[in-house]
Amino acid sequence: MRVLVAIGIALALSAASALAGDFEDAVTSYKAKDYEKAIASWQKAAAQGNASAQFALGFVHEKGQGTAVDYWQAAAWYRQAAERGHAAAQTNLGFLHEKGQGVARDNKQAVYWYQRAAEQEMAEAQFNLGRMYQTGHGVEHDYTQAASWFRKAGEQGHVGAQSTLGLMYETGQGVERDYKRAVYWYQKAAAKGDSRAQFDLGRIYEVGQEGVAMDYVEAHRWWNIAEANGEERARTSRILVERLMTPEQIAEAKRRASEWTKAHEKQ
């Protein structure tokens, strides 16, 4: 299952209600890729208790921007910001605990920090918390809870959560099996370019399921789109379904795929 690891520096900006002084100077320097100057300014702001500056310092140490990669320092700065309630820092600190980078590997601590961030509507944390419930890492295995957190993240537009929810509805994992809901969530993820969700839509349309009619044209369309986005399985599936289609159906499927691609290129 995919995990979105890094939260960009933009989250540090959104977490601050007002940008001024050293913090704002650091942001300007960061955007200019003058990381050393940014770090110096953020250190001044962090010393004054600015949680967003503390998060930013954790981020640059984690990514090695203007300094060597240092997970220990990253964790230390994230912790300071996390204890002040900074949701992005809580999320990243949770991930460091999950991976054992700069801190002891501790899934319970990962869940603790993901939970705190998830309760602040941080979609990435909600997705990660869903993963922990789904796999039973650091918390009791609970597919229902997993689906609940994936749904919260999916409703905020988290692509990984949307794709995962599609699979859960398709298989009845933690939710009542519902192919129409599976298609709904797959389409959400597919619209954002998720090639796996695009491929999965093709699977469902190829055979048809309760509430979703079999449709070779739609299957071909989604596999065409998925293949263009790098999903290697899609090419084989597309070729196989073409054997069951008329030339007119194939032409229509290609037209729909082209039309969909052009529409989403503009977004």
Image (cartoon, helix red, strand yellow):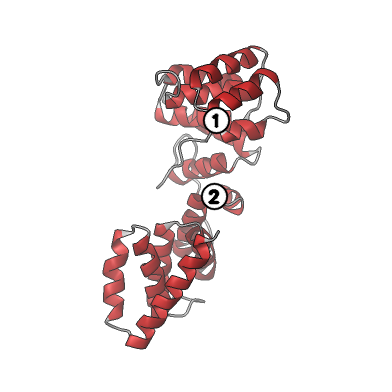
Front one among 89 and 139? 89
- In the rendered image of this protein, does residue 118 appear above or below residue 36? below
| Dots 1, 2 in contact, CB < 8 A | no
- In the rendered image of this protein, does residue 73 appear above or below residue 211? above
- Asked if one can make out residue 121 in the rendered structure from this viewpoint, the answer is yes
Q: Position of residue 28 (x, y in %)?
A: 60, 26
Q: Position of residue 264 (x, y in %)?
A: 51, 63
Q: In which quarter of the view is residue 228 placed? A: bottom left
Under mark 1, the amino acid is Lys
In the image, taking residue 184 as reference, residue 84 lies left or right, namely right
At 45% from the left and 59% from the top, the residue drawn is 167
At 58% from the left and 50% from the top, the residue drawn is 148
Q: Which mark is residue 105?
A: none
Assess disc 1: are there few (<14), some (14-19) or many (≥20) residues with their C-alpha within 10 Å of its C-alpha.
Answer: few
Sequence-wise, which precedes: disc 1 or disc 2?
A: 1
- Asked if one can make out residue 103 in the rendered structure from this viewpoint, the answer is no
Q: Which residue is mark 1?
A: 31
Q: Which residue is mark 2?
A: 158
- In the rendered image of this protein, does residue 123 appear above or below residue 11? below
Q: Position of residue 11 (x, y in %)?
A: 59, 35
Assess disc 2: are there few (<14), some (14-19) or many (≥20) residues with their C-alpha within 10 Å of its C-alpha.
Answer: many
- C-alpha gap between disc 1 and disc 2: 25 Å
At 63% from the left and 32% from the top, the residue drawn is 13
Front one among 80 and 256? 256
In the image, taking residue 178 as reference, residue 239 lies left or right, namely left
